[in-house]
Image (spheres, rainbow, N blue to C red):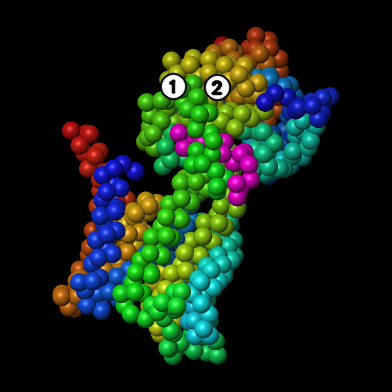
């Protein structure tokens, strides 16, 4: 799915406006604004504790921002629950592995998309694979997981579970996906593979991505637009080369 | 399911169906009781094993079903009305009991459901006008089926046996549907589930409601089997026993309840020859199982396969 459909041709896709989140005196997110266009891939970088994940959680309804707005396709989504957001085509991955450990890899992928098919009573009467078997198999092939498709997801290696985790987020063909450190704990050869997969998915499904990542090589090659956060604020924004060369970013995050 | 398994299952069902013909009436009674508890424990396995919602209140639903059946069967209602009424009432009460589960989990939820069980028990014991209090309700008639009386031990056994098979087929179908997968997702990772559009509120409530309905239906058979009910069998300790059956058999495994129910309903009877020792032996057996087989009896084949693969 690409963009917001025909309903709101003029509306911005994702617009984060002056979002703040404070825990007592600590300002985890301190007035962050940015926009993401349809089909765009935006990277978010910054040192640990700079508020990236808090920003994600504020956008995604996991926590309520202290102030500020988040609009998606012209609709205000601030404070909506993760369930409501998923219904609007907003998906995510988490910083840590979040798979359904006892379900098979194939079932993990099917369950990731089945709730978007028909109504709840209809799903009770639907065939066991909810009509998603073929799509799941394609995804399994795409992510190179065929040899483990029938095994419980929890029994696989970290890297394999990471791939399942990401594949699940893409199963419902979301319009916007927020990926929180997709490369964390993933070996270097898999990082390149992951980047290629994400670029292919972006072309195939047309969704927009926002990616938090510490792997600079990955983010610089994947994202045409990068935001650098430091201490809850946006320090620099722009094409990766510009952000990378920014003196403040070098001092606060990238070093020499 | 592969061929060997299907064959094994059919053989077991036939053996189970034939066996009562060679037993005395107490044996037939025990086998019927086994079927009754199996209904409730199948339901509890859905709530606890598949959907991951801790429940220590299953005996309350068995009781609610049994008391309703006692009252309505004595009024002469046909079994085909009493059964759905018990199922629906327990479904609704189960739905209500599901609400605490939306707020608390694990042992907190265990205590919330346990409190519910105590409450129901107190109502059964104290509301004498309806429930007969500690004296209970005697003289519950056995139902008849299309004019065919189920008075005898064997006809009632076959009626109960057939019913538990039908219930199992229904649950098998339910758990293989997308709902079953959503229940498992709720159990394994509710946070991820909700970010994937899975309405965990609805599935949590349904997990309790469906599990409760199974126990409610089982309660009807219980009342008709023993023909006299009082509060004691629906005490929360019975809920503990049922939870034990789920865990010993293999929580979240479809046939786990069958083995678990054999252990908690039939094994104590078989151990009776040990007289005063039987409870101690039973206790030790359970402790040993929990230590060496935390996945339940049905995890044995899997373990053997892993061992084989490791060599």
Which residue sits at x=29%, y=70%? B31
Marks 1 and 2: which is nearer the front? 1
| Lower sequence index among marks 1 and 2 | 1
Q: Marks 1/2: CA distance?
A: 25 Å
Q: Residue at x 47, y 40 (%)?
A: A100
- Measured from the top left, where is residue B248 in percent x and y? 31, 58
Chain bearing tag 1 is A
Residue A168 percent across, percent down from the top left? 53, 32
Whether residue B139 can be seen here = yes
Task: Kindly indicate the quadrant of the structure image that contains residue A5.
Answer: top right
Residue A64 image point, x, y percent:
70, 43
**Does residue B251 appear to the left or right of B177 in the view shown?**
left
Residue B178, given in percent of the width and then of the height, sits at: 52, 44
Most prominent secondary structure in the magenta stretch?
helix
Residue A245 visible? The answer is: no
* Mark 2 residue crowding within 10 angstroms, few (<14) / some (14–19) / many (20+): many
> Relative to B232, does residue A21 appear above or below in the rendering?
above
Asked if the residue under mark 2 is in contact with the one under mark 1, i.e. CB atoms within 8 Å, the reply is: no
- For disc 1, the marked residue is A144
**Is disc 2 on the same chain as disc 1?**
yes
Q: Residue furthest left?
A: B274
Give the magenta range: A106-122
Viewport quadrant of the N terminus of chain A: top right
Residue, disc 2: A214
The chain ID associated with circle 2 is A
Count of marks overlaid on the render: 2
* Mark 1 residue crowding within 10 angstroms, few (<14) / some (14–19) / many (20+): some
Which type of secondary structure does the marked residue at label 1 adopt? loop
Which residue is painted at 34% across and 69% down in the image?
B158
Q: Which of B16 and A144 lies nearest the eye of the viewer?
A: B16
Label 2: state its secondary structure. loop
């Amino acid at each position: 799915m690409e963009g917001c459909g025909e309903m709101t041709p003029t509306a911005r896709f994702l617009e984060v406006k002056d979002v703040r989140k404070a825990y007592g005196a600590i300002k985890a997110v301190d007035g962050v604004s940015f926009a993401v266009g349809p089909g765009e891939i935006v990277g978010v970088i910054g040192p640990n504790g700079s508020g990236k994940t808090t920003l994600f959680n504020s956008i995604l309804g996991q926590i309520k921002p202290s102030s500020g707005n988040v609009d998606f396709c012209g609709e205000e989504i601030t404070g909506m629950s993760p369930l409501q957001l998923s219904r609007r085509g907003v998906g995510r991955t988490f910083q840590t592995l979040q798979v359904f450990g006892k379900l098979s890899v194939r079932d993990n992928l099917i369950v990731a998309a089945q709730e978007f098919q028909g109504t709840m009573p209809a799903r009770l009467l639907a065939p066991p694979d909810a009509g998603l078997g073929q799509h799941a198999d394609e995804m399994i092939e795409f992510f190179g997981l065929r040899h483990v498709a029938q095994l419980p997801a929890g029994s696989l290696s970290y890297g394999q579970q990471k791939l399942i985790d990401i594949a699940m987020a893409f199963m419902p063909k979301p319009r916007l996906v927020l990926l929180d450190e997709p490369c964390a704990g993933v070996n270097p050869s898999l990082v390149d593979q992951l980047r290629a997969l994400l670029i292919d998915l972006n072309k195939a499904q047309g969704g927009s991505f926002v990616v938090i990542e510490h792997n600079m090589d990955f983010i610089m090659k994947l994202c045409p637009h990068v935001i650098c956060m430091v201490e809850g604020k946006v320090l620099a924004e722009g094409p990766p080369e510009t952000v990378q060369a920014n003196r403040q970013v070098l001092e606060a995050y990238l070093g020499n | 399911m592969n061929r060997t398994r299907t064959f094994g299952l059919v053989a077991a069902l036939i053996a189970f169906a034939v066996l009562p013909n060679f037993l005395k009436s107490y044996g037939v009674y025990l086998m019927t009781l086994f079927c009754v508890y199996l209904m409730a424990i199948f339901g509890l396995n859905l709530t606890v094993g598949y959907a991951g919602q801790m429940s220590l209140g299953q005996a309350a639903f068995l009781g609610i079903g049994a008391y309703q059946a006692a009252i309505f069967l004595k009024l002469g209602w046909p079994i085909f009305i009493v059964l759905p009424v018990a199922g629906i009432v327990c479904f609704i009460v189960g739905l209500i009991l599901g609400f605490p589960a939306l707020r608390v989990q694990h042992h907190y939820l265990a205590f919330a459901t346990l409190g519910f069980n105590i409450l129901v028990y107190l109502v059964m014991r104290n509301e004498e006008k309806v429930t007969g209090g500690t004296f209970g309700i005697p003289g519950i008639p056995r139902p008849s089926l299309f004019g065919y009386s189920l008075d005898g031990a064997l006809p009632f056994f076959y009626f109960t046996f057939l019913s538990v098979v039908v219930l199992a087929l229904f649950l098998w179908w339910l758990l293989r549907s997308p709902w079953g997968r959503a229940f498992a997702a709720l159990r394994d990772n509710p946070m991820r589930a909700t970010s994937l559009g899975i309405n965990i509120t609805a599935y949590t409530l349904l997990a309790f409601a469906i599990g409760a309905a199974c126990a409610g239906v089982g309660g009807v058979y219980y009342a008709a089997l023993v023909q006299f009910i009082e509060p004691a069998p629906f005490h929360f300790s019975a809920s503990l026993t049922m939870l034990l059956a789920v865990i010993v058999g293999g929580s979240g495994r479809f046939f786990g309840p069958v083995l678990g129910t054999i252990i908690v309903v039939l094994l104590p009877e078989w151990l009776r020859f040990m007289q005063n020792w039987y409870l101690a032996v039973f206790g030790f057996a359970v402790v040993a199982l929990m230590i060496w087989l935390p996945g339940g009896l049905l995890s044995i084949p899997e373990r053997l396969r892993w061992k084989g693969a490791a060599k």
